[in-house]
Image: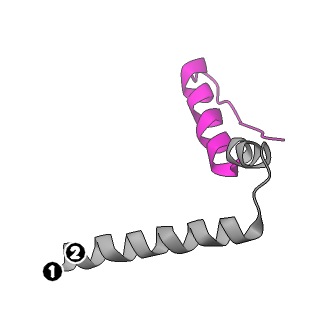
Amino acid sequence: MLIIPVKEGESIERSLKKFKRKFEKTGTLRELRNRKQYEKPSVTRRKQIKKAAYVLQKFSVEAE
């Protein structure tokens, strides 16, 4: 459960913004979307490898 302390005189919009930021950092929504549909471990690993190769290529191009 997320607890957001609200200070005296602090606006609701600011508190809501804090809540949204904290909620996003927990990764709850991301995990829910991932669990919506089952993905085999081999497919997950393949995606991770492709992403790592892409990031490596992108950074190696920028370094040159």
Local crowd size for mark 1, using a 10 Å CA cut-off: few (<14), some (14–19), many (≥20): few
Q: Which residue is mark 2?
A: 61
Nearest the camera: 44 or 30? Answer: 44
Q: Is residue 41 above or below residue 38?
A: below
Comparing 16 with 49, the one in front is 49
* Residue at the spot of label 1: 64
Residue at image position (75%, 57%) is: 39
Position of residue 14 measured from the top left corner of the image (x, y, whole percent): 54, 27
Callout 1: SS: loop
Expressed as whole percent of the image width and height from the top left, the position of residue 33 reads 71, 42
Query: What's the CA distance linking mark 1 and mark 2?
Result: 6 Å
Give the quarter of the figure containing the N terminus.
Answer: top right
Which residue is drawn at the image coordinates 62% and 26% (left, top)?
Answer: 16
In terms of image quadrants, where is residue 64?
Answer: bottom left
Q: Is residue 15 above or below residue 57?
A: above
Q: Is residue 33 left or right of residue 20?
A: right
Residue type at numbered disc 2:
Val
- Residue type (three-letter) at the residue carrying disc 1: Glu
Which one is nearer the viewer's eye here, 56 or 22?
A: 56
Magenta region includes residue 61: no
Decide: few, some or many residues near mark 2? Use Cα within 10 Å; few <14, some 14-19, many ≥20: few
Residue 41 percent coordinates (x, y): 75, 68
